[in-house]
Amino acid sequence: MDFQSRILGHFNASIDAKTYASEVLPPFIEVASQMMVQCLVSEGKILACGNGGSAGDSQHFSSELLNRFERERPSLPALALTTDTSTLTSIANDYSYNEIFSKQIRALGQPGDILLAISTSGNSANVVQAIQAAHDRDMHIVALTGRDGGDMASLLGQDDCEIRVPSTSTARIQEVHLLAIHCLCDLIDQQLFGSTE
């Protein structure tokens, strides 16, 4: 087997997925960034959740806001709901794994806050329940999905925003999700702190 050709195939598939996504996603990413900025200037916060690689993306996003992205600026309030193992395991043990995010949202979420809900399939049961809990708390949703949007898409209202990657490959969807997260971080900084160019 020619491993380098296989590697090149992955690079090319990623490039193709991002090129296709670039033709579809910019308006949705722009709207999502504006929602997040409005939340932040209104003294709200952004909660983020997902499973597996999407949990990593949740933490990546919150760290870019709490610490910094590509410029020096004040910290911004964001929290990944995927990091407190005592909380996660106690909820999973005492109730259900499907409630590990929703119970946190019911405790921490406030009206006007945003939930960044991430699932490549759109069908993760605990993320679906997180969206329902966020709506119960009068929060808005920015959903990062793929494929057909899954169950998450059907739960979103007119004040929510779905960034749906037009791909059926989990790896490609994850790669575009990370790029979308970086776009969101950049646009938040641009709108709150001005251009550096």
Image (cartoon, grey):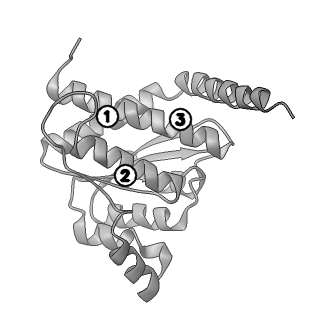
| Disc nearer the start of the sequence (2/1) | 2
Q: Residue at x 55, y 43 (%)?
A: 174
Depth check: 170 or 130 in front? 170
> Dot 1: what SS?
helix
Left/right placement of residue 31 relative to residue 96 reads: left
Q: Is residue 58 above or below residue 193?
A: below
Q: Residues within 10 Å of mark 1 (few under 14, many from 20)?
A: many
Label placed on residue 92: none
Q: Which mark is residue 59?
A: 2
Residues at discs 2 and 1 in contact (Cβ within 8 Å)? no
Q: Residue at x 17, y 21 (%)?
A: 194
Image quarter where the N terminus lies is top right
Distance from label 3 to label 1 (Cα)?
Answer: 14 Å
User: Tag 3: residue type?
Assistant: Val
Alpha-carbon neighbours of circle 3 within 10 Å: few (<14), some, or many (≥20)? many
Marks 3 and 2, how far apart in space? 16 Å
Tell me the residue at 28%/34% (across/down): 69
Asked if residue 120 is positioned above or below residue 180 in the image, the reply reads below
Read off the residue under disc 1: 185
Instruction: Name the mark on residue 176.
Output: 3
| Residue type of the residue flagged with mark 2 | Gln
